[in-house]
Image: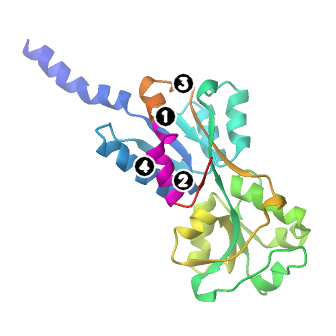
Amino acid sequence: MRFVLFLCLLLAPVVARAQAVTVFAAASLTDALKDIAAEWTKAGHKPLRLSFGASSSLARQIEQGAPVNLFASADLKWMDYLAEKTLIAADTRRNLLGNTLVLIVPSDKRRQIAITPSLDLTALLGANGRIATGDPAHVPVGLYAREALTKLGLWDAVMPRLARTEDVRAALLLVERGEAPAGIVYSTDAAASKGVSVAGTFPADSHQAITYPFAVTKAGDTPEARSVMTYLAGPQARAIFSQRGFKVQ
């Protein structure tokens, strides 16, 4: 009897971990999801396990078998990537949020810039400065930035001066530290930092609409995961997303 009791106590944490919900989310969702996770826990639920990074990196980890229950991407491309491989529960997929693409500078060098085809971004960068943004080869913010700069006819001049980062928060950090004189991030990231100032907003028609699809993964499809998904789409979470500057859809 004592052995059985000991075994139950030993296995209890394992069972608890098995029921915990793991969320992989785009780096730009860091602050909002931490706020939402805190409210979720206050409501009596098990704490969420949150992991943030570039949507591309997270999607590939899911493809490689990472134990994830829910994925939140900063663009449609990487959710589509997993959907094509039947790695998400298709009936749970929802586009929940939108965002805005902005040009930032260090807060002690505030300025206002009209982002038009006549903008000389290289002059803003100086002789050796670089513009920080996510790697446009795969990071969503970099993909949006490349599309916008191309549409405006600025890409060829700016491309050699890019500081390509692993995710949007890394780009934000370079500008905060003054290691890059400018950066391209989402408006929600800029709003979360006292170290940067928004110099200008990219025209909405210069790039695809910034969309955040959420979905439960096929391998992590549990009742708990679906409950979290429902909560993220519900009024309390929507209010927090809105407070953090996201466009709630």
Q: Secondary structure at mark 3?
A: loop
- Which residue position is annotated with label 4? 36
Q: Is residue 68 visible?
A: no
Determine contact: label 4, label 1, CB under 8 Å.
Answer: no
Closer to the N terminus: mark 1 or mark 2? Answer: 2
Residue 29, disc = 2
The residue nearer to you, when weighing 171 against 28, is: 28
Q: Compute the Cα span from label 3 to label 2.
A: 23 Å
Closer to the N terminus: mark 4 or mark 1? Answer: 4
- Which residue position is annotated with label 3? 219
- Which residue position is annotated with label 1? 230
Closer to the N terminus: mark 1 or mark 3? Answer: 3
Q: Residue at x 88, y 62 (%)?
A: 150
Mark nearer the viewer, 1 or 3: 1
State yes or no: residue 169 in magenta: no
Estimate how packed mark 1 is, as few (under 14), some (14 to 19) or many (20 or more) residues with alpha carbons within 10 Å.
Answer: few
- Please name the predominant secondary structure of the magenta segment in the image: helix
